[in-house]
Amino acid sequence: MDKLEHFLTRAEALLGRLETMLPPATPLIEWDKAVAFRWRTRQGRGYLQPVPGLSSIALDDLQNIDRQKSAIERNTRQFVEKRPANNVLLTGARGTGKSSLIKACLNAYAAQGLRLIEVDKDDLHDLGDIVDLVSGRPERFVIFCDDLSFEDGESGYKALKVALDGSIAAQSDNVLIYATSNRRHLMPEYMKENESYRHTDDGEIHPGEVIEEKISLSERFGLWVSFYPFKQDDYLTIVGHWLRHFGAAAADVEAARGEALIWALERGSRSGRVAFQFARDWTGRHEAAGA
């Protein structure tokens, strides 16, 4: 009897050590608890983490990007209504509303079943697993890759190409990929690569293999939407919108114009992000002064 108890004790201790070496169990996904998720990895195993506090930004909050907003909103509406829609690449100047536009679309269509899954560039090799995980769900999922760019040889580059349009399997009907980037072709471009262009006898110009490879990823997005730096009047319009959002009176908005321009000059940018940051700072300072 003593030998049996000794054996069971040792076996229990061994099992305890083995359990610490095993990857943790995948958390159950509470689909009704959130409309946005982040893909996380723990000890080599991926899982969806709900995002409880979501940005409340609305489509009406995004100023001076009406053409871009119309294109993204229309594509998202088609997707939610189970009509044909495209993967989307949003490129251009920083701080002009690329990421905010995607979040605003989520807020607009979450009640109709739209869901968002944010995936870091380093986890793009898990895209196939993510699609498999949600393919049987009734919701419509946008996989969101923010501030995306690649260096030569990164593994996520090929994984994204396959997920977009490179697998023998058909793309899941309830999944689209929306990506934002400051680079139109998602990879660095060098002057020396222009030397690879070929001239044919009839005068046509054809890109070389290096250029073709870089273009091949971005062209798999069916919809390209470009964003441009704001003019001064556009920037001041956005400042005024956010100041009114925080409760400023019309006279205060007019009086703040000079400070807003100095704020942008010091940061070297007249972007929507800079306008929002100024409005927060201005409102905080003046609320403190009036307290």
Image (cartoon, grey):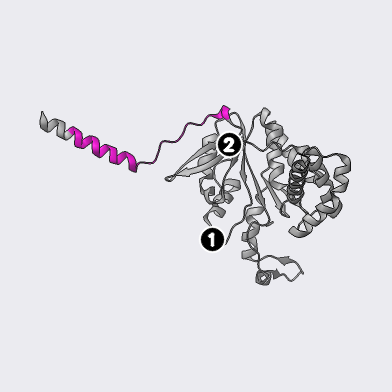
Q: Which span is picked out in magenta?
A: 8-33
Q: Which of 258/59 is in front?
A: 258
Q: How many marks?
A: 2
Residue 240: which quarter of the image? top right
Residue at numbered disc 2: 51
| Magenta-span inclusion, residue 204 | no
Residue 175 bears which disc, if any? none
Residue 172 location (% of width, % of height): 58, 37
| Residue type at the position of mark 2 | Val
Q: Which residue sits at x=86%, y=51%?
A: 233
Residue 66 in sight in this render: yes
Label 2 crowd (10 A; few <14 / some 14-19 / many >=20): some
Residue 84 in sight in this render: no
Residue 261 location (% of width, % of height): 82, 55
Residue at numbered disc 1: 153
Q: CA distance from mark 1 to mark 2?
A: 32 Å
